[in-house]
Image (tube, grey):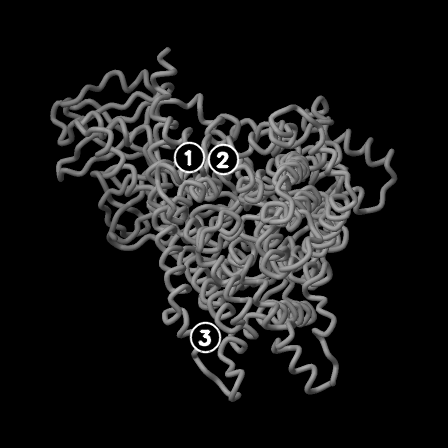
């Protein structure tokens, strides 16, 4: 009883979280299984339609490829950053820039690329002037290829933010101990650094995957017509003026999204917990 | 890992240049594009002036800034006392509260907005149609960042002793929180506030699919007809966020070492 | 196993920008000897060790091992075993794999690695923990594994960088004796860096006291204690009373008697007298008074206020100290050992 009384001041917090997070989530999960108030798997079945499957496949492709590219290039950039003096202004500026691009720049990135390689983009015009090629011609920026390029622009910084702490967790003593025991640089990396960093690297790659899969703003800003990936399919389901029952489809798609992201995040947490023990 | 050989330095230099080009060129392109005079050639600041001159855009900016302020205030009012209370009185709830605060990392904003429709029928009924009702949802969105920042700050002080000392000297709870604890976790609060501002200013998913005209929504809308202005607005937001976080990193100088778990919300504003 | 080699550090200087971490350090270590480098933080002792290991480069000077100049030899080829202050065990490897790591780097076959590493773990008494990970061991156990790992490669030189500083007091004393025992058994030339003078005096064959990049004195522990060569050494090693004294004819005059003055004494100043060399005798006509008695177990410290108001501390067996109470009049003297007289600061 005392516990309950002590817990009362936590109510405002709980209220906000329940109303604005739990209820919407439960609504989505529940509504995916109900059609017109009756339990039905009709909405779930719609997930296996060719449109939905095609969108799922494209989402997986987009997320997987940008996770891979982002993880590898991001790890390299992270290494570059860690190799420079810890309190230098350059380092702070780079990490701040990475934070902005990775987390808060969704729409802005779409416009950044429009300004660069769009129809009237700076690079497009320059290339046209100098080489005579039409860089933006086929409208590739608004298709999956374009999305891959733009997504990489925030995946790499995200990798940097997540992976730099792991790199910093590699204690100097380990390298020095390995060296004093006769390890060459190559042996040190192979026997010590890589095994220690691999869980963090894989975990970060998973995080990048989940991040791309759940991303909406950039795609929404770039692609105004058509719905190649799942988030855009949700958008058209929600804003559809054609068929009234489409919002049910949106619920099913949202459920699909939760399942995928949650599964990936669970795997991510498992990997990260192991790393946290080592690299603290 | 520090190789100070000449070859190593050249290699790193080349890599820096390559990354620099990739990341800074589009930003430069934005600056160029947004100052271009499409009709007469040459430079113009018309697109940038639109940030104030264009009514729709300007009011969207104001709304977003207000939303940011409201979200930060609401978040602090709700989160700080709660976290202090949990540490002092209900430590058994710590795991639960932490789980709830980190849950938004796993639930995409897109999913939240889809499920939010019913809830919002009630919200608009009670609180009206303004975009400012997004405050509570945004509080939820920023929870993971804010929780981590404040938790780290709380962990670095001896909260129990401070609170007991204050109470034994006769201070009530609000005095204890406001005048004893808060000044000591100031860097955590600032951190939470700045990051929350950046999240709110960059948020698009929930606002757009709920039909509210916040800054990002407006930018996308304008983008269909007026490229330069939307590019200018986007660049402005990016720069503002960058300055915010840079100032933050200078103010909270290396206090808290980042851990691998300091992560972001999948699809937060992307 | 290993009869060790001689180590020579000749005129080592290390400059960082405007800071001189090492200033012309010259140190010769005999084969099989354990030399402790003792000094406060920043004195250069760790810098010297790291230069010997090859982890740092001297601005000038040379390093020789077994008669050969190794100044240009990279760290991973110097064949030295190193034990760090903490956190140096590879967290992703078991204890056995950690110890066998150096052998793996030398290309030994798996069976050989396992048996040699096993022998090393026997030596430090941790065979039962072979398959555990570093996080499952206590601080003291981790350092013993680190020691086993360093010795497994049968290094020519063993380097210890404040190996006990991160441990609890009790564990520190136990491990200190263990390290010395192992080192004597294996016979490796060893350099032991520490800021704890008790540690240095307990384990070393010779102790080098360092201050601000320079070697102040290099001597056997008893010698260092009884005959400090400089005021810094006298101050840093052991406790001291400072008693006004004058020196003439090689003798220091203080407290109404005279004792030999050590080389380097100034003509007039403060004599550094160890508490155990101070004598206190009950004397109704004495000019000093007992101010307090501190019971420390087997020994006690008796504090007496002198005529000029200063307080001197004497160390004696507690049975003797029982005779004194605060307020008792006494005469304070000093045993006929050598003292160093330094300038009044």
Task: Check disc 1 and report its element: helix, strand or loop.
Answer: helix
Which tag, 3 or 1, sits closer to the chain's start?
Answer: 3
Residue at the image point whose x is 13% and y is 31% from the top: C287
Query: Is A33 located above or below residue B106 in the figure?
Result: above
Q: List x then y, in percent, for residue B56.
A: 41, 64
Chain assignment, label 2: B
> Callout 3: 10 Å neighbours few (<14), some, many (20+)?
many
Q: Nearer the viewer, mark 2 or mark 3?
A: 2
Contact (Cβ within 8 Å) of mark 2 with mark 3: no
* Badge 3 element: helix
Q: CA distance from mark 3 to mark 1?
A: 39 Å
Residue placed under numbered mark 1 in the picture = B122
Closest to the camera, between mark 3 and mark 1, is 1
Q: CA distance from mark 2 to mark 1?
A: 7 Å
- Residue on which the image places disc 3: B47
Locate residue B98, reporting x and y percent.
48, 32
Label 2 secondary element = helix
> Is there CB contact under 8 Å for labels 3 and 1?
no
Q: Earlier in the sequence, mark 2 or mark 3?
A: 3
Same chain for labels 3 and 1? Say yes or no. Answer: yes
**From the viewer's perspective, is C102 left or right of A29?**
right
Which chain is mark 3 on? Answer: B
Instruction: Please tell me which residue lies in front, B209 or C205.
Output: B209
On the same chain: label 2 and label 3? yes
Residue B207 is situated, as x and y percent measured from the top left of the image, at 48, 50
Residue for point 27% across, 23% down? C294
């Amino acid at each position: 009883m005392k516990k309950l009384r002590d817990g009362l001041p936590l109510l405002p917090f709980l209220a906000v979280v329940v109303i604005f997070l739990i209820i919407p989530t439960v609504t989505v999960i529940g509504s995916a299984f109900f059609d017109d108030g009756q339990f039905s798997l009709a909405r779930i079945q719609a997930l296996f339609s060719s449109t939905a499957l095609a969108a799922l496949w494209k989402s997986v492709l987009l997320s997987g490829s940008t996770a891979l590219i982002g993880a590898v290039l991001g790890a390299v950039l992270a290494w570059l950053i860690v190799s420079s003096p810890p309190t230098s202004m350059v380092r702070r500026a780079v990490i701040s820039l990475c934070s902005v691009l990775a987390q808060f720049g969704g729409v802005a990135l779409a416009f950044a690329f429009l300004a660069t390689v769009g129809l009237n983009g700076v690079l497009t015009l320059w290339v046209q002037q100098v080489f005579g090629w039409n860089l933006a011609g086929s409208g590739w920026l608004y298709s999956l290829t374009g999305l891959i390029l733009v997504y990489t622009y925030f995946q790499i910084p995200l990798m940097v933010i997540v992976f730099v702490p792991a790199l910093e967790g590699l204690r100097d003593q380990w390298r020095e101990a390995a060296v004093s025991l006769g390890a060459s640089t190559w042996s040190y990396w192979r026997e010590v650094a890589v095994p220690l960093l691999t869980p963090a690297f894989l975990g970060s790659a998973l995080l990048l995957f989940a991040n791309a899969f759940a991303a909406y703003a950039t795609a929404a800003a770039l692609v105004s017509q058509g719905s190649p990936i799942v988030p855009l399919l949700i958008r058209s389901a929600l804003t559809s003026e054609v068929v009234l029952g489409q919002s049910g489809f949106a619920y099913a798609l949202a459920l699909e999204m939760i399942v995928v992201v949650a599964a990936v995040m669970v795997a991510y947490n498992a990997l990260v917990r192991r790393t946290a023990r080592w690299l603290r | 890992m520090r190789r100070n050989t000449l070859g190593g330095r050249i290699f790193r230099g080349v890599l820096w240049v390559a990354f620099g080009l990739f990341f800074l060129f589009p930003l430069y392109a934005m600056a160029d594009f947004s100052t271009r005079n499409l009709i007469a050639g040459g430079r113009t600041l018309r697109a940038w002036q639109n940030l104030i001159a264009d009514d729709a855009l300007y009011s969207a900016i104001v709304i977003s800034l207000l939303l940011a302020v409201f979200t930060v205030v609401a978040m602090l009012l709700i989160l700080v006392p709660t976290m202090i209370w949990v540490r002092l009185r209900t430590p058994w709830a710590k795991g639960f509260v932490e789980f709830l605060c980190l849950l938004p990392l796993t639930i995409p904003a897109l999913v939240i907005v889809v499920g939010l429709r019913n809830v919002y029928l009630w919200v608009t009924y009670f609180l009206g149609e303004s975009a400012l009702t997004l405050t509570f949802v945004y509080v939820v969105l920023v929870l993971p960042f804010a929780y981590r920042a404040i938790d780290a700050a709380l962990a670095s002080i001896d909260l129990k002793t401070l609170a007991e000392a204050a109470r034994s000297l006769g201070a009530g709870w609000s005095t204890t929180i406001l005048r004893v604890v808060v000044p000591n976790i100031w860097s955590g609060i600032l951190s939470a506030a700045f990051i929350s501002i950046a999240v709110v200013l960059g948020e698009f998913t929930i606002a757009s699919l709920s039909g509210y005209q916040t800054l990002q929504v407006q930018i996308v809308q304008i983008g269909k007809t007026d490229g330069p202005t939307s590019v200018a607005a986007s660049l402005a937001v990016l720069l503002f966020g960058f300055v915010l976080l840079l100032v933050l990193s200078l103010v909270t100088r290396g206090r808290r070492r980042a851990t691998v778990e300091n992560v972001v919300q999948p699809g937060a504003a992307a | 196993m290993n009869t060790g080699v001689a180590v020579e550090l000749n005129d080592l200087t290390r400059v960082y920008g405007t800071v001189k971490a090492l200033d012309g350090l010259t140190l010769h270590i005999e084969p099989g000897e354990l030399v402790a480098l003792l000094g406060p933080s920043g004195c250069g002792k760790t810098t010297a060790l790291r230069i010997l290991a090859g982890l740092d480069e001297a601005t000038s000077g040379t390093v020789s091992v077994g008669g050969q100049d190794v100044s240009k030899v990279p760290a991973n080829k110097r064949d030295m075993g190193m034990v760090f202050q903490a956190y140096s065990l590879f967290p992703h490897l078991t204890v056995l794999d950690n110890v066998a790591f150096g052998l793996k780097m030398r290309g030994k076959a798996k069976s050989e690695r396992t048996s040699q590493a096993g022998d090393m773990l026997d030596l430090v008494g941790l065979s039962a923990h072979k398959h555990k990970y570093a996080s499952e061991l206590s601080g003291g156990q981790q350092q013993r594994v680190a020691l086993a790992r360093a010795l497994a490669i049968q290094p020519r030189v063993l380097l210890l960088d404040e190996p006990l500083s991160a441990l609890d007091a009790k564990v520190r004393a136990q491990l200190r004796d263990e390290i010395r025992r192992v080192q004597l058994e294996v016979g490796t030339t060893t350099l032991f860096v520490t800021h704890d003078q008790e540690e240095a005096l307990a384990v070393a064959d010779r102790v080098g006291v360092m201050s601000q990049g320079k070697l102040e004195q290099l001597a056997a522990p008893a010698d260092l204690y009884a005959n400090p060569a400089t005021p810094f050494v006298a101050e840093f090693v052991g406790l001291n009373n400072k008693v006004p004294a004058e020196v003439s004819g090689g003798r220091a005059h203080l407290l109404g008697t005279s004792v030999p003055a050590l080389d380097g004494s100034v003509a007039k100043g403060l004599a550094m007298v160890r508490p155990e060399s101070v004598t206190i005798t009950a004397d109704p006509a004495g000019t000093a008074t007992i101010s307090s008695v501190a019971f420390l177990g087997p020994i006690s410290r008796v504090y007496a206020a002198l005529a000029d108001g200063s307080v001197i501390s004497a160390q004696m067996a507690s049975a003797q100290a029982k005779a004194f109470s605060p307020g008792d009049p006494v005469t304070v003297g000093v045993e006929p050992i050598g003292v160093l007289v330094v300038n009044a600061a």
